[in-house]
Structures are given as C-alpha cells and as structure tokens.
Amino acid sequence: MQVGEILLFISKILDLLLYTIKIIITFAIRSAKIVLKKGGIMCVIKDVTRFIANGAKVLRDSSRGEYKQESEIISQLKKELFIESDKMDDKSKLKQDRKNIEKDVRDAWEKLKLSNG
C-alpha cells in the first residue's frame, strides 16, 4: 500500500466514525425525548447500548466481507414461492382455502341477517 492509499483509507474510516457518532447522538436525543415522557432514563441507556452493539456487529461483519442481504422472513417467502411443490399438496391447500373462505362468508352473512332482524 502506498502512503496516499493509507491516508485515503484513514480518512474514510474517520468519516465513518464521525457519521456513526452523529447517528448515535441523534438517536440518543430522540430516545431520551420519548422515554423521558414515559419516565425512565434506563430505557434510553438500554436503547443506546443496543444500537451501538448492533452497529459494531454490522461493522465487524462488513469488514470481514460477510453481508446478509435478506432477513429471515424474506428467505422463508422465497422458499415458499420458488421451491417446487407437489400438485396434490397445492390442490389440497386450495381446497382448504376455499372451505375457509366459504365459512367466513357464511359467518358474515349470518351476522348481517341477525343485525337486520
């Protein structure tokens, strides 16, 4: 690495740290306003600590090159949508969905009849 690259790297790290500190202070002020209305300072400390710990974890993971692009819910939806399923299983699910909808419509109709006399 050359001196110019090292200085550029250090300046980017300092920019990142300053931006992180700005976010932490903003978050702490907003949390303090909300929590002080409710009446507890320990909640502010707990929220700020959790926020800093999460930021450190994300920074550590990203510096290692480990990026988690999707949440658990998204991965479950992808699994459900894109994995091949059995046609008989799909038919049984559609049949069950239809029965559930018919039951809901019947219940709503009965409530409507009862409320109108």
Image (cartoon, rainbow, N blue to C red):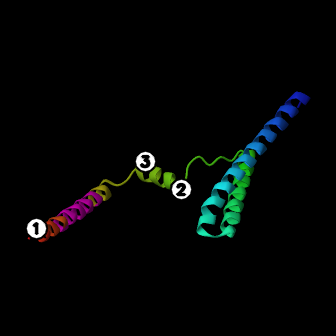
Q: Is residue 61 magenta?
A: no
Find the distance from the CA under tag 3 to the CA under tag 2: 15 Å
Q: Position of residue 4 (x, y in %)?
A: 88, 28
Answer with the quarter of the image where residue 17 lies.
top right
Assess whether mark 2 and mark 1 are in contact (beta carbons under 8 angstroms).
no
Q: What residue range appears in magenta?
A: 93-107
Q: Which mark is residue 102?
A: none
Q: Residue at the front extreme?
A: 37
Say which of 51 and 8 sits in front.
Answer: 51
**Quadrant of residue 88 in the image?**
bottom left
Q: Nearer the viewer, residue 56 or 27?
A: 27
Can you tell which mark lies on residue 72?
2
Magenta highlight: main SS:
helix
Classify residue 116 as left or right of residue 27: left
Q: Is residue 50 above or below residue 7?
A: below
Residue at image x 78%, y 39%? 15
Q: Answer yes or no: do the residues labelled 3 and 2 have beta carbons within 8 Å?
A: no
- From this viewpoint, is residue 64 visible? no
- Disc 1 vs disc 3: which is toward the camera? 1
In front: 64, or 105?
105
Secondary element at image label 3 = helix
Mark 3 or 2, closer to the camera: 2
Question: Along the polypeptide, which appears first: circle 1 or circle 3?
Answer: 3
Report x, y in % for residue 109.
Answer: 14, 65
x and y percentages locating residue 22 in the rendered image: 72, 46
Secondary structure of the residue carrying numbered label 2? helix
| Amino acid identity at mark 2 | Glu
Residue topped by disc 1: 116
Q: Residues within 10 Å of mark 1 (few under 14, many from 20)?
A: few
Instruction: Please state which amino acid type lies under the numbered disc 1.
Output: Asn
